[in-house]
Amino acid sequence: MGLYSVSYPRVSGFLKNGNRDFAKDDPLEFKSHQWFGASVRSKQDKILACAPLYHWRTEMKQEREPVGTCFLQDGAKTVEYAPCRSSQLISDQVAEIVSKYDPKVYSIKYNNQLATRTAQAIFDDSYLGYSVAVGDFSGDGVDDFVSGVPRAARTLGMVYIYDGKNMSSLHNFTGEQMAAYFGFSVAATDINGDDYADVFIGAPLFMDRGSDGKLQEVGQVSVSLQRASGDFQTTKLNGFEVFARFGSAIAPLGDLDQDGFNDIAIAAPYGGEDKKGLVYIFNGRSTGLNAVPSQILEGQWAARSMPPSFGYSMKGATDIDKNGYPDFQVELLLDKLKQKGAIRRALFLHSRSSGHSKNMTISRGGQMQCEELIAYLRDESEFRDKLTPITIFMEYRLDYRTAADATGLQPILNQFTPANMSRQALARLSCAFKTENQTRQVVCDLGNPMKAGTQLLAGLRFSVHQQSEMDTSVKFDLQIQSSNLFDKVSPVVSYKVDLAVLAAVEIRGIYIFFSKLRNNGPSSFSKAMLNLQWPYKYNNNTLLYILHYDIDGPMNCTSDMEINPLKIKISSLQATEKNDTVAGQGDRNHLITKRDLTTREGDVHTLKENQNHSYSLKSSASFNVIEFPYKNLPIEDIFNSTLVTTNVTWGIQPAPMPVPVWVIILAVLAGLLLLAVLVFVMYRIACLSLSLPIPIAPDLLKLRGIWSLGLVSGSCALGDELSSEPRALQ
């Protein structure tokens, strides 16, 4: 894929001068350890290389400020571009940057410059612009800006999306973990093929709990899929190694595997063996990003004093070697299930063999290549196996002898796409009916060969259709045919099965029908008739049995069927609203009702055993006005009708649940406790009665010549004897 195998035709220097000074020993800038080349972008013959830790200071202040700087090379000319000397996100045109560059001017004003508003002091050190990507998020065809702010929101980190026309805010994302450096890297590409740009946000210091429950630094990438409504659906993709800084760099790669969905690369610069660095290739699909990488690139440089940080900065979506898809080897095999050396029952017509192979070259973006091959089946006398299915097997693989490009880099196959496939040309033989005899005959293969003494048990499940009442049995004729030279056909054996029709159909429940007829005026009528039609019987059997109907007022009801002939009584019939016809005559209403109960038959289709169906019962009501209290006035006939459909739904009453054992035990304990309380209360009442004063008749006691009342006092205690003695009041 040419991600890191490139050739360098020339070496171009950006920084040829040292630090610039205000005066001797009074430096203006500080380039040591500035990380020059930490981010590199290129387009056609223009190259942009940045140094994010570049420091400078003003002449009046001694403090150094890490504003960062970039160098833009356009052909042979190199200019400096340092927009980050202000706390804004700024966009300038490349042509104007090159034309207005003056090495003696440290802050240059450009025309048609787009910039965010200057932030307040509380937003200092938020690192706005730490990472930048572009994509159309407003649907106006103009690229918008995606900027990472990893120290915003109290180090939770944020990512802003700014409008490419006026730098107004369109959307923002906020991290979920402090100090995870959410927004360290950002990228924008359409990963699911819906023509909406999606956002990828890296948080390389994100920590997650491992299998032992402890927090581990694994890194995380947030995948935010843009919807048609403009909002985003976000999923998380965690790293695979500890301290690998997964998500330090994210690069869109375009459509690598030509499946219609863009792919993306995510770097873990300190992952892999000896922390040489890893780059994961993830494929896009209609549902988003595939969570499993299709390829992992490993760094090839050994670590010295510092890790090589392979993948710390990436740029993709460029076909460096200009090659297409390489050569493939395709192999096709007939009757794959047969062991080696066995007779192949199917052969290719052009080669008279069961195998076919060829080399094919697929070009990038080319059309699908197809080839039609004709195969035939050997004569039946040449093989004995007629039951095993004939399987066609095809596999393809890369021809690595010719697939490598000029740099020696070899492609790989997508590991999520199977490299082989198989199809059955002849399914396993089984019992099936013959279409030419209207399913009256079933043919079964019993085995080839069928050895002596073999016993087979076969079952046939069938359904009965159009069975008349006269049919009481079904007869089956069985016969065996073989390929023997003699006695190929056995005698026909008939088997008779008696039919037993068992069915019990019932409709349960009480159905209450209301009918109401109201005269809305303005005229009155003298007489009207209401006619009700009801599904009373079906096939001379009672369908909906009428138990009772109410009559209210001067009305007459008649029916051609006897109402409740079985004299069935119900415990309670709910009060129902009366069916009435109200006729208004001046200030007085007359209640006149007429009802006829007639029958209507309904068709009920076949019910299987223990099968419950829901049905709709249709009842109709019609009325017509017979007479008006007006004379010599031509009055048209007034009538109307309505149809009421009632759905009858099968309801199964749940079986009563058995009383749990713990409920029984609890009830017994509660009863014993209640009994103990009652015994204690009664005991206390008995003791109290023994302690109360008992009046004594005056003629029974006479002490010291004074008539008085005697008291009988006693004591009562649990476990003591009851005693009492009379005492006199002094």
Image (cartoon, rainbow, N blue to C red):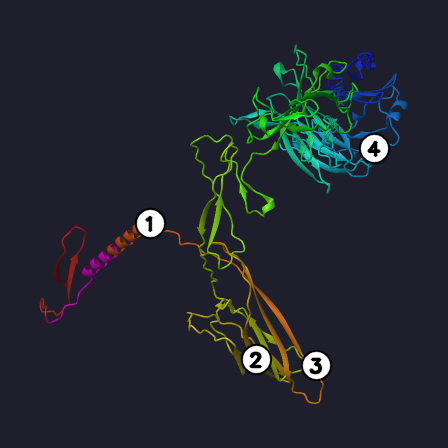
Q: State the SS at label 4.
A: strand
Q: Is residue 571 above or below residue 220?
A: below
Q: Is residue 580 left or right of residue 565?
A: right
Main SS, magenta residues: helix
**Image quadrant of residue 328?**
top right
Q: Which residue is mark 2?
A: 593
Amino acid identity at mark 4: Leu
Label 3: few (<14), some (14–19) or many (≥20) C-alpha neighbours in 10 Å:
few
Label 2: few (<14), some (14–19) or many (≥20) C-alpha neighbours in 10 Å:
many
Magenta stretch in the rendered image? 680-699
Q: CA distance from mark 3 to mark 4?
A: 83 Å
Percent position of residue 183, x then y: 69, 29
| Between discs 2 and 1, the one toward the N terminus | 2
Q: Is residue 434 left or right of residue 541?
A: right
| Between discs 3 and 2, the one toward the N terminus | 2
Percent position of residue 31, x then y: 77, 15
Q: CA distance from mark 3 to mark 2?
A: 21 Å
Q: Is residue 179 visible?
A: no
Q: Which residue is mark 3?
A: 636
Amino acid identity at mark 2: Thr
Q: Which residue is mark 4?
A: 114
| Between discs 3 and 1, the one toward the N terminus | 3
Q: State the SS at label 2.
A: strand
| Between discs 4 and 2, the one toward the N terminus | 4
Which of the two marks, 4 or 1, is nearer to us in this view? 1
